[in-house]
Image (cartoon, rainbow, N blue to C red):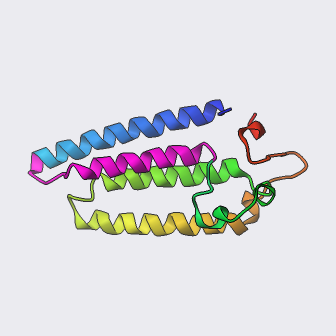
Amino acid sequence: MVAKGQKRTALVLGLVWAAMAAIAYTISEIYGLNLYWYTPFYSLLLILAGLIISFGHIRIFFPFIFMSTEDLSGYNVEKIASVLGILIAVLSYLLLFISMNAFVLWMIIIVCITVEILATYASVAKRFKADLQTNNYTGSSAGYK
């Protein structure tokens, strides 16, 4: 079951993506820049990945791929998913503007590196560890309240 706050976050991220796509298209039309057809498509794929991650599916990141359900139960998946999902969404927003400016490409590379560093940090930081006395997260959606 998905928490109500997660649904609201997903809706806001989706609406912001639609607004960013409209802004990117408008800027490209005003200044005569090329907004290639595949840029919004890849950006849409990234926003969908960000939404999936924000719902708690963090096993696509490096440190969490190799963790068993028991190992993952030691982490506060909701916090990790929230932070990484929003960063992936920001990456998709930046991708909309990549074909217009080379500076944005460097910003995207920096955000990609930041996301992977944060995923690695989340796997070792105490702030993302679950309080096992109060949180019995088992790796399924049953742990959400």
At horizontal 62% and vertical 34% (from top left) the residue drawn is: 5
Quarter of the image where the C terminus is located:
top right
Name which residue lies at 39% across and 52% down: 92
Q: Is residue 33 magenta?
A: yes
Q: Main secondary structure of the magenta part?
A: helix
Vertical placement of 28 versus 14: above or below? Answer: below
Left or right: 96 in relation to 86: left
Instruction: Give the residue at x 84% y 52%.
Output: 131
In screen coordinates, is 26 left or right of 45? left
47 part of magenta stretch = yes
Using the image as rendered, state which of residue 67 and residue 28 is in the foreground. 67
Q: Quadrant of the N terminus?
A: top right
- Residue 35: x and y in percent read 18, 51
In the rendered image of this protein, does residue 24 appear above or below residue 128? above
Where are the magenta residues, as a range?
30-56
Indicate the quadrant where residue 14 lies: top left
The total number of labels drawn is 0
Q: Which residue sits furthest top?
A: 4
Q: Position of residue 34 (x, y in %)?
A: 14, 54
Expressed as whole percent of the image width and height from the top left, the position of residue 87 reads 50, 55
- When the figure is inspected, residue 91 is found, relative to residue 18, above or below; the finding is below
Residue 16 percent coordinates (x, y): 39, 39
Direction from residue 10 to residue 18 in the image, left or right: left
- Residue at the left extreme, as displayed: 32
In this rendering, position of residue 20 left or right of residue 74: left
Dividing the picture into quadrants, the one containing residue 33 is bottom left
Which residue is depicted at the point 48% across and 49% down? Answer: 49
| Vertical side of 59 occupied by 54: above or below | above
